[in-house]
Image: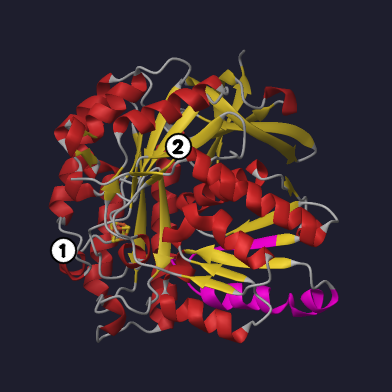
Amino acid sequence: MKKTIEVPQEELQANLDVAARLHAELQGRGLRYYIESYGCQMNDHDAEKLSGMLQACGYLPASSKEEADLLIFNTCCVREHAEKRVFGNIGALKKRKDAEPGLIIGVCGCMMQQREVAARLYKRFPFVDLVFGTHELHHFPQLLSRALEGERVISVRESDGEIAEGLPVVRNGSFSTFVTIMYGCDNFCTYCIVPYVRGRERSRAPENILAEVRRVAEQGFREVTLLGQNVNSYAYADADVDFPELLRRTNAVDGVERIRFMTSHPKDLSPRLIEAMATLPKVCNHIHLPVQSGSNRILAAMNRRYTREKYLDLVQQIRGAVKDVEITTDIIVGFPGETEEDFLDTLSLVREAGFAAAYTFMYSPRPGTRAAAMENQIAEEVKKQRLLRLNAASTEQLQKGNSKYIGQCGTVLVEGCDQRAGEVTAFGKLPNFKMVYFPGGAELIGTMREVRITGTMNNSLIGDLIK
Ligand code: SF4
């Protein structure tokens, strides 16, 4: 049974009011904050909640770190060298804190959920005021109040399976946004730190998710991405709702025009999900389906719990059912024990699967994971060479796939514009995630536009605006 903690709104507001009063009294020179967020969409969305809480108690966003009198580093421990980078950035603030003792510095995010890393940071940088882990997000106003009263605060606790609802959110952007449907992960892939820092899998109640989707639709967001470490295993036992059913209910929300989701674990991808993608008109014909390796031996060592045959079979099923679908993936090279033969299996899988994009990484050990302690770690040079070969194979496939678009028409949601070769160029994605560049300016951002594809460019398509 999934446990949900509803943060009582009166209590939350009272805590926010205390934080605002303290900040005004103690600093008296402005109420500006700046959040530097690293890592994945999950972290970005946590930063949106921190912004929501800060703005609810009177803070305004600062346009730069220098302008802020409250600085928050929302850290991530998934990427390589993350710790070095964060520690370096925080260390560089010592001089400024000496000159501006009123500056409050906080550090949070999944790197701080690793107790020993949090303790090391807290000890090494005595000018840091506030350190807290991922499971303390909804206690942020109280923790901040303590820091504003002059206490140095460190708070990292294990998840007890709760989900905090009702936190205020300030969303980045105005036409596309994220809605978290679940937290944590139970899969324990042997290279991954996420289950240790984000806790065990727990799903939000469908009525809370749908209420949030309705709210963002009313605010004018046209595209919603349902977010979770493994959305395919979304399950809310009390309401007997699984992920395909959640998609069906989201599809019925007025105002939402496109529904995306990420990330999908291949072992939990059901025929019902493929059917939902094929039949629900607002659900986009794109799936991000990380394969990680094309070798069965390495997939087993990674604890992925599917085989290359099963993965390729899924790819076929999806392509057979979902019109014009595109599939993207993540791949790791140089996992401990990966032989040349294993790597060749990955290259052949890339050729067979025909991915629209592959996000490729060299394996690097994360302390505390099983793979970090494995023998047969692969030499850096070998990993680098394999990454280059993999990228070349994946680009070749991608470019082959791009050519079929020439002459086709489709609808893009315009995300932005920039200067390219002296021309103002707009860009946006087709429902299947292909990026299209075409002549157009800032007035198009956030609108749906018809384009005709006229050419290709590296990973993307070039088009003309039809209307
Ligand atoms: S499914 Fe595997 S890779 Fe993804 S978050 Fe869970 S443990 Fe990490």
Q: Is mark 2 within 8 Å of ligand 1?
A: no
Locate the C terminus and report the quarter of the image it occupies. top right
Q: Is residue 390 left or right of residue 12?
A: left
Which residue is drawn at the image coordinates 73% and 47% (left, top)? 61
- Residue on which the image places disc 1: 296
**Label annotation for residue 466:** none
- Residue on which the image places disc 2: 402
Q: Is residue 150 left or right of residue 398?
A: right
Tell me residue 446's x, y (percent): 62, 25
Magenta span of residues:
71-99
Which residue is drawn at the image coordinates 65% and 54% (left, top)? 19
**Which of these two is toward me, 275 or 130?**
130
Real-space CA distance between mark 1 and mark 2, rounded to the nearest whole angstrom: 29 Å
**Which of these two is toward me, 334 or 169?**
169
The amino acid on which the numbered mark 2 sits, given as a three-letter code, is Asn
Lower sequence index among marks 1 and 2: 1
Confirm whether the magenta stretch covers residue 82. yes
Name which quarter of the figure residue 78 lies in: bottom left
Please tell me whether residue 151 is drawn above or below residue 67 in the rendered image.
below
Near mark 1 (Cα within 10 A), the count class, few <14, some 14-19 or many ≥20, is some
Tell me residue 300's x, y (percent): 16, 66
Please tell me whether residue 171 is drawn above or below residue 186 in the rendered image.
above
Q: Is residue 40 in sight in this rendering?
A: no
